[in-house]
Image: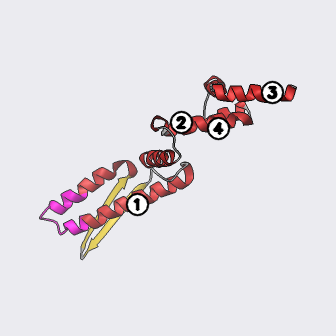
Amino acid sequence: MTQDINVLALVKGQERYIFLYDDGHKSEALRTLGRFASNPELSFSWYDAAVLSQRIRQTAMEQRAEYVGDGLMFPISRSQFWRVIRKHAAEAGIAAHKRRPHVLKHTCGMMSIKAGIEHARQYLGHKNIASTGAYLCVDDDAASKAVATAAVAFL
């Protein structure tokens, strides 16, 4: 497994500063910039540290944006997703205790059961079909409607 190395370079007159770091050591690279800036023997200033720090953060954000485009369902954080769910659930009149992303998953599960149990298992990400069995349970209202529909069709 290869790991990319990030390079930061700064040229100040005859002096050259080159910093190498990998993605797992960004915070260490930021601390190193601070140590260089606090060293009075170097011409490396706090402004230089700020500019290069911003570049490290910008690169991290760009890499995250590439990942979001390739692997995540939503280009927002987990906490932002919670806020969106709570806001729209409140507007829809859903009870406060049901304003959670996991309840949304249950809703999708119940709706996808109609497409077939194996399809629902895959859609919900369950490894075991038994986990999907919980979605086969229906509430009393749904059961009553199904029985009433069947009775009318039978008569």
Sequence order check: which comes first, mark 2 or mark 3?
2
> What residue does disc 2 label?
103
Within 10 Å of the Cα at label 1, are there few (<14), some (14-19), or many (20+) other Cα atoms? some
Residue 142 placement, left or right of 60: right
In the image, residue 47 lies in the stretch drawn in magenta: yes
Question: Which residue matches tag 3?
Answer: 150
Q: Which mark is residue 59?
A: 1
Outermost residue, right side = 155
Q: Residue at x 27, y 69 (%)?
A: 16
Viewer-closest of 136 and 41: 136
SS for dot 3: helix
Disc nearest the viewer among 4 and 3: 3
Q: Amino acid at mark 4?
A: Tyr
The residue mark sitting in front, 4 or 2, is: 2
Q: CA distance from mark 3 to mark 1?
A: 61 Å
Instruction: Indicate which disc, 4 or 1, sits on the residue closer to the N terminus.
Output: 1
Q: Name, please, the residue furthest toward the top.
A: 130
Magenta region includes residue 10: no
Cα separation between marks 4 and 1:
34 Å
Q: CA distance from mark 2 to mark 1?
A: 36 Å
- Name the residue that disc number 4 marks: 123
Q: Residues within 10 Å of mark 2 (few under 14, many from 20)?
A: few
Is residue 154 or residue 41 the one in the foreground? 154
Helix, strand or loop under label 4: helix
